[in-house]
């Protein structure tokens, strides 16, 4: 499932990888973006944005009934980049207030909690570890003085952690963004300098996987044997 922009408007589509059939799932005046599968493959979460960009809402829907959407009441700010947790209990997303931060929405308690408070560090592109115990995100210093880097923090349900719990997965002058953790736990990211997709291994030079400018984060098949991405 992906978002496709046609004639200035984005809708959700599903591509059957076996038959090649393409099915349009939404058809509204709004933009539908950033779809994410539930772990059991029966539901989607995605963001709907009004044409004038004045409002956005995080929605949940059954895959076989994409118009039967249920808004997730997360508060007055604009959500983006939702990612369903491996156990299906939560959805991590970016919430922009004064600065973009990772929040987690608990589907059982229907509450949102900030993942970690980091003054002056903007968060984008959250990604769950395969076991659901940690969340990774790209951190950007607000003044742009340092390259984008990848950070990881343990997820504690209902608890906002302090900055001391952060673990930097990358460092140095090479920036990285849009991390994706494969089902086998290997870390992939887009290198900021050339937008190539690389595999990041601690203590080793990054291994280039796709030597073309990558325009999106990578999605893996559940068994980890295939990946999907868009390139320029």
Image (spheres, rainbow, N blue to C red):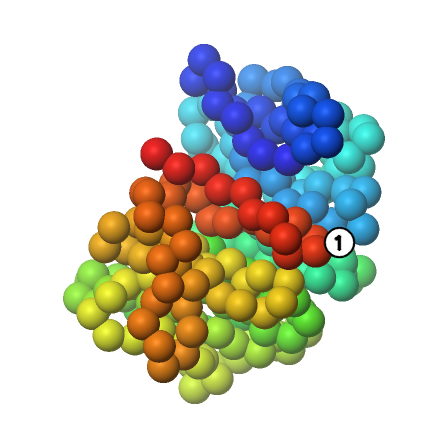
The answer to whether 27 appears left or right of 153 in the picture is right
Q: In which quarter of the image is the N terminus?
A: top right
For the residue carrying disc 1, how many other residues have a C-alpha within 10 Å: few (<14), some (14-19), or many (20+)?
some
Q: Nearer the viewer, residue 161 or 216?
A: 216
Task: Name the residue: 61% across, 19% down.
Answer: 28
Where is residue 167 shown, x and y percent of the image? 44, 81
Is residue 220 placed above or below 106 in the rendered structure?
above
Residue pictured at 50% horizontal, 35% vertical = 55
Where 4 falls versus 1 (above or below)? above
**135 above or below 198?**
below
- Identify the image quadrant of the C terminus: top left
Give percent across and percent down for residue 91. 65, 56
For this rendering, which residue is in front, 231 or 87? 231
**Mark 1 residue element:** loop
Who is closer to the viewer here, 39 or 32?
Answer: 39
Q: Residue furthest bottom?
A: 164
Q: Is residue 222 visible?
A: yes
- 195 with respect to 13 (left or right): left
The reply to whether residue 114 is visible in this rendering is no
Q: Is residue 5 above or below residue 62?
A: above
| Residue picked out by circle 1 | 39
Residue 200, image x and y in percent? 41, 68
Answer with left or right where residue 133 lies relative to residue 39. left
The image quarter containing residue 135 is: bottom right
Residue 172 at x, y = what percent? Answer: 24, 74
Question: Which residue does the image show at 45% across and 13% down from the upper left?
Answer: 7
- Counting labels gives 1
Going by the picture, which residue comes out furthest to the top? Answer: 7
């Amino acid at each position: 499932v992906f978002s496709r922009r046609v004639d200035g408007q984005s809708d959700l589509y599903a591509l059957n990888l076996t038959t090649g059939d393409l099915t349009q799932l939404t058809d509204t005046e709004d933009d539908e973006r950033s779809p994410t599968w539930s772990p059991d493959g029966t539901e989607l979460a995605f963001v709907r944005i009004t044409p004038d960009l004045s409002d956005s809402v995080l929605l949940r829907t059954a895959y076989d009934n994409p118009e039967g959407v249920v808004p997730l009441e997360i508060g007055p700010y604009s959500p983006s980049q939702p990612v369903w947790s491996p156990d299906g209990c939560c959805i991590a997303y970016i919430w922009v207030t004064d600065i973009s931060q990772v929040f987690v929405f608990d589907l059982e308690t229907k509450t949102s909690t900030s993942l970690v408070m980091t003054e002056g560090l903007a968060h984008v592109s959250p990604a769950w570890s395969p076991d659901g115990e940690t969340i990774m995100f790209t951190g950007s210093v607000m003044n742009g003085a340092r390259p984008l880097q990848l950070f990881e923090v343990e997820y504690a349900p209902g608890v906002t952690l302090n900055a001391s719990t952060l673990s930097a997965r990358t460092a140095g002058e090479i920036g990285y963004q849009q991390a994706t953790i494969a089902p086998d736990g290997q870390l992939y990211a887009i290198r900021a300098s050339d937008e190539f997709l690389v595999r990041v291994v601690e203590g080793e030079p990054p291994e280039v996987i796709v030597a073309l400018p990558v325009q999106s984060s990578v999605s893996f098949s559940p068994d980890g044997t295939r990946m999907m991405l868009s390139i320029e």
